[in-house]
Amino acid sequence: KNSTEMQLRSNSTYSTSADIERLSQIFGISLSGIAVNERTAIGIPAVLACLEIRNNNMASVPLRVYTATNKGPKLDESHTLDYALNIRPNAHQTPFMLRKTLGIHRDTRGVGVAAIERDDYRNTIGFRVLQPQEYTIYETSEIVSGKRERTYIESDGKIHREEDLIIWGSISMDGLYFRGITGCLTEVIRTGLTTRQFINSYYQNGTFLGGILTSENNMDKDVATRNKESWQQAHGGSDKAGKVAVLSGGLKFQPIANTLVDSQLVEFLQLDKFEIYQAFGVPPHLVGDTTKQTSFGSGLESQTTG
């Protein structure tokens, strides 16, 4: 009887590319056909700005290596780990870009994972970012002791033990599996994407006259359809805004004010923005939004100081 059992652990963060596509089809598409994932989320300016501000700042924090001496800690610039952290973590990334990439993975996908590159003496000489969709995690548990160990297998077959990885997780209920901030804001992001889709459609296909065509004459369905298509062809689209409409055949134009629709759209967009700021923990003025007074102060100078 084997003393260990192996289980495959796979979710939106730890999965193959095939799992990602399948999960997106099942869970990531709303009734309106809008997929909510890290790629569509960064289409929201507030999300993109928060990702940039958070991770630019975190990537700029110095990480140095110190050696204990009789006179206290001493900066050890000759250490291989210090070189990897501050000079060249791998052949194609600067330390700043490596940390920023891990942070963006953490905020959007729930976890940032980097493989630790070691020399023959097990000294750390570099780091390599692993793309979440390019590896699978297996969990091995000993039946008797209950000890658990996770193994990461890349799509090319390369195996990593957990001790050879940096795992930077975001929101978790058990400390093992994580969810990104954008994943927790699915409905907020979907609302923002839907609102922007509506605005684009409204201004691209709308007549900009906002009203209803009426007639005292009886019209069958075919005549009504032709009148509608003729009106849309003549006055639909942003390139035809402001043109003079000529009505014939007893048609009358009854205008409808767009103020209510416009104000509701603005309210939706403003609410979405501040919910995104709150979730990311970014003060609004740092992303250029100074429309409201915040707890950091009333003036831009006091906000910046805060």
Image (cartoon, grey):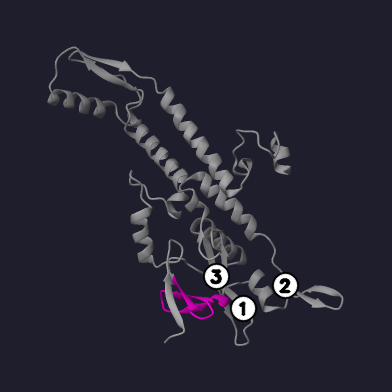
Q: Nearer the viewer, residue 15 or 297?
A: 15
User: What kind of residue is marked 2?
Assistant: Val
Q: Residue at x 58, y 44 (%)?
A: 278
Tell me which numbered mark, 1 or 2, is placed earlier along the sequence.
2
Residue 253 falls in image quadrant: top left
| Above or below 255: residue 22 | below
Q: Nearer the viewer, residue 48 or 181?
A: 181
Residue, disc 3: 114
Residue, disc 1: 125
Q: State which region is magenta.
A: 136-164
In this rendering, would 57 be left or right of 130?
right
Is residue 147 inside the magenta stretch?
A: yes
User: What kind of residue is marked 1?
Assistant: Ile
User: What kind of residue is marked 3?
Assistant: Ala
In this rendering, would 292 be left or right of 129?
right
Separation of disc 3 and disc 1 at Cα?
13 Å
Residue 208 appears in the figure: yes
Tell me which numbered mark, 3 or 1, is placed earlier along the sequence.
3
Is residue 98 inside the magenta stretch?
A: no
Label 2 sits on a secondary structure element that is: loop
* Foreground disc of the pair 3, 1: 3
Residue 251: assigned label? none
Tell me which numbered mark, 3 or 2, is placed earlier along the sequence.
2
Residue, disc 2: 65
Question: Are discs 1 and 2 less than 8 Å apart at CB?
Answer: no
Label 3 sits on a secondary structure element that is: strand
Q: How many marks?
A: 3
| Above or below 282: residue 145 | below
Q: Position of residue 133 (x, y in %)?
A: 43, 66
